[in-house]
Amino acid sequence: MKNNWSFLEKLQLDGAIRIELVENVPIFRASSTTIEKIEALLAKQKELSLTLNETNELDEFEELDDYLSLVNRIVRNALQKDG
């Protein structure tokens, strides 16, 4: 896995991640702005070729989704264990 600290730092500054409570469990999700960016890239990918930068950005969003899923599982498991 490549080092994506600059990408992750940028996401924090852009408000790319939001936290919502679901049944008193904090769930980390992509913000509506991030989802719009992903949807725009996917739509463009269906119609045209993405640039290298756009392909990298889409890959980074996929990695972000993996990170958020992992964090959400860890949080859920920790709260279930404590509860």
Image (cartoon, helix red, strand yellow):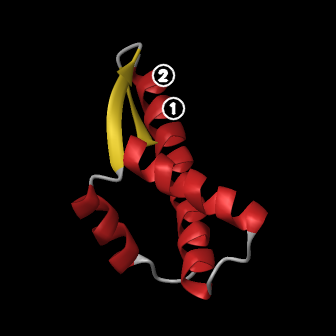
Q: Is residue 55 above or below residue 19?
A: below
Sort mark 2 into few (<14), some (14-19) or many (20+) by Cα contacts within 10 Å: few
Q: Quadrant of the C terminus?
A: top left
Looking at the image, residue 6 lies above or below residue 44: below
Amino acid carrying mark 1 in the image? Asn
Instruction: Find residue 49 and report its image quarter.
Output: bottom right
Q: Amino acid at mark 2?
A: Gln
Residue 66 position, x and y percent, is: 59, 55
> In the rendered image, which residue does mark 2 sit on?
80
Quadrant (top left, top right, bottom left, bottom right) of the N terminus? bottom right
Compared across the picture, whether 73 is left or right of 83 comes to right
In percent of width and height, residue 24 lies at 35, 16
Does residue 33 appear left or right of residue 41 in this picture? left
Residue at (41% x, 26% y) in the render: 79
Q: For mark 2, give the secondary structure.
A: helix
Tell me what residue is drawn at x 35 percent, y 48 percent: 17
Q: Residue furthest right?
A: 46
The answer to the question of whether label 2 and label 1 lie on touching residues, with beta carbons closer than 8 A, is: yes
Q: Residue at x 44, y 77 (%)?
A: 4
